Amino acid sequence: MAVSFDAIIVGTGQAAPSLAGRLTQAGMKIAVVERRYFGGTCVNTGCIPTKTLVASAEVAHKARRAADFGVQLPAGMRVDMRLVKSRKDAVSAQSRVGIEKYLKGLTGCTVYEGHARFESSRQVRVGEDLLCADRIFINAGGRAFTPDMPGLDTVDYLTNSSMMDVDFLPPHLAIVGGSYVSLEFAQMYRRFGSEVTVIEKGPRLAGVGRTRTSRMQSRTS
């Protein structure tokens, strides 16, 4: 038997907390469904973790140039990528836990953890639970796109999402695609100490009209 709600929100990305808050404030009974990580791309594989990595890379860059500013580092400078990743994970976790706690604490909001599947235009199944509502908001975001490149299936490669699990410094990072996401990774890893090669088939980097749809694909060599 289906459990009835006034609204169902599928996915807990950037729009979900504010939408859930407004709906419950209006007195609605809502359900929120999350398949994996609360907070979606921005919190787990996008803005927050990448900007945290950028900040670490900037410190490494400044430390490497310390002598240019009259600052001596007798012991030298070394980047510990395990600690860099640990800091990034801690920053993301703080936001992820905060969003989860907020949603689960909303009066009138029931959180379901699992994969949502439509069974009709007004019914969503999550595991053994069948949810029903007249309003269903899809806030599921997207996934990294892997291009159809000859030979790609024969090598280990990384996407902008799986790159978040890297806890070592690649000697050489080849980045396929010149979008703003690609260039962000290129700059940070060059500052960490990797050799970086950016491959772009278009006439320019970060071309007009590509920045919203491009996906960074990279592999170590």
Image (tube, rainbow, N blue to C red):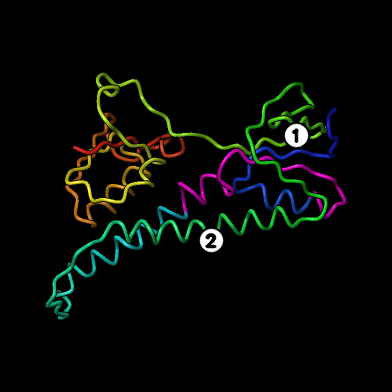
What are the residue bounds of the magenta stretch?
A: 23-47
Residue 92's place in the image compared with 203, above or below, is: below
Q: Quadrant of the N terminus?
A: top right
**Quarter location, residue 157:** top left
Q: CA distance from mark 1 to mark 2?
A: 28 Å
What's the residue at 49%, 56% (across, down)? 92
Q: Residue 118 in the image: x percent, y percent? A: 70, 25
What secondary structure is marked by label 2? helix
Q: Quadrant of the C terminus?
A: top left
Q: Is 148 or 116 nearer to us in this picture?
A: 116
Q: Is 209 or 181 nearer to us in this picture?
A: 181
Tag 2 or tag 1, which sits nearer the N-term? 2
For label 2, the residue is 94
Q: Is residue 27 magenta?
A: yes
Q: Residue 36 in the image: x percent, y percent? A: 56, 41
Q: Is residue 47 left or right of residue 201?
A: right
Q: Are marks 1 and 2 in contact (CB under 8 Å)?
A: no
Tell me the kind of residue under disc 1. Ile
What's the residue at 40%, 53% (across, down)? 50
Q: Residue 135 in the image: x percent, y percent? A: 79, 35
For label 1, the residue is 136
What's the residue at 24%, 34% (across, down)? 199
Tell me the kind of residue under disc 2. Gln
